[in-house]
């Protein structure tokens, strides 16, 4: 994750866009012979997943690999990928829009859906975090902050939230021309990298 952040920071672009595949794990069908290992019982009835479940430890790796393959085969423009999120950049909004449109076409062709308006959640926070703007926290910012926290709680697919005195929560933040970016990590003693809980822009 840090390598991805450093690589993104090395791109001296003026414009960035994120494309988030909607429910990417559920876009990936499980082979019939694999389904029994995902069986579970609920209220006395046995069920099984027929799509890649979100809570399985290998789901992020499988999802990342399949999206990466789709992007490579589809001839996607230069981008960075983190599981089901793709970042494109450029020096003009038009350039970034064109690249984003191409990535979306490739994803749709590969059987994935796209979340529209994904970065709109934190848009009200951009107003108060830009260098030239006065910091005035209002109801709109509070609501966006609350919604962002809810998204963080529900988006944990890379590692469970851990608690305890020896667990350290680490947040990395950067302020760009187009708004803030941040990532949240948890580290336990002896871990060099820790577990990623998520990243946002």
Image (tube, rainbow, N blue to C red):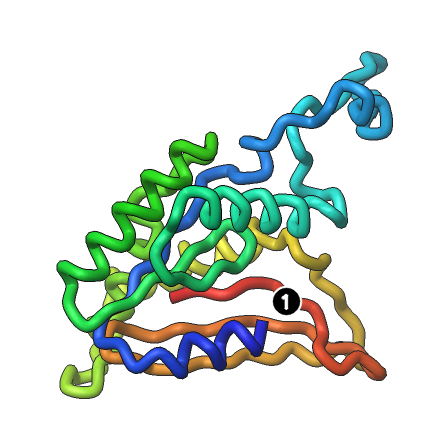
Q: Is residue 139 left or right of residue 160?
A: left
Task: Decide which of 107, 130 is in the foreground and name it.
Answer: 107
Question: Which residue is most to the top?
Answer: 45
Side of 45 where 52 appears, left or right: left
Image coordinates of residue 155 in percent, x first then y, are: 56, 52
Is 121 located above or below residue 131 in the figure? above
From the viewer's perspective, is residue 106 above or below residue 10? above
Count of marks placed on residues:
1
Residue corresponding to mark 1: 196
Q: Residue at x 24, y 64 (%)?
A: 124
Q: In the rendered view of the protein, which quadrant contains the C terminus?
A: bottom left
Sort mark 1 into few (<14), some (14-19) or many (20+) by Cα contacts within 10 Å. many
Can you say which quadrant of the picture contains the N terminus?
bottom right
At x 68%, y 73%, the residue is 186
Residue 65 placement (x, y as % from top left): 61, 49
Please state the horizontal and vertical placement of residue 31, each as a whole percent of the image.
73, 24
Quarter residue 195 falls in: bottom right
């Amino acid at each position: 994750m840090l390598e991805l952040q450093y690589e993104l920071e090395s791109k001296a672009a003026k414009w960035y866009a994120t494309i988030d595949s909607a429910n990417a794990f559920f876009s990936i069908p499980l082979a019939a012979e694999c389904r029994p290992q995902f069986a579970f019982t609920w209220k006395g009835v046995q069920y099984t997943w027929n799509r890649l479940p979100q809570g399985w430890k290998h789901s992020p790796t499988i999802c990342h690999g399949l999206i990466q393959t789709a992007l490579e085969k589809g001839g996607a423009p230069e981008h960075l990928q983190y599981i089901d999120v793709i970042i494109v950049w450029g020096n003009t909004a038009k350039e970034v829009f064109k690249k984003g449109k191409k990535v979306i076409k490739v994803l749709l062709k590969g059987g994935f859906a796209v979340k529209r308006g994904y970065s709109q959640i934190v848009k009200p926070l951009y107003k108060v975090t830009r260098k030239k703007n006065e910091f005035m926290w209002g109801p709109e910012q509070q609501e966006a902050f609350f919604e962002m926290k809810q998204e963080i709680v529900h988006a944990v697919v890379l590692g469970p939230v851990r608690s305890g005195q020896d667990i350290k929560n680490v947040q990395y933040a950067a302020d760009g021309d187009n708004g803030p970016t941040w990532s949240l990590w948890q580290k336990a003693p002896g871990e060099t990298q820790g577990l990623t809980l998520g990243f946002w822009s």
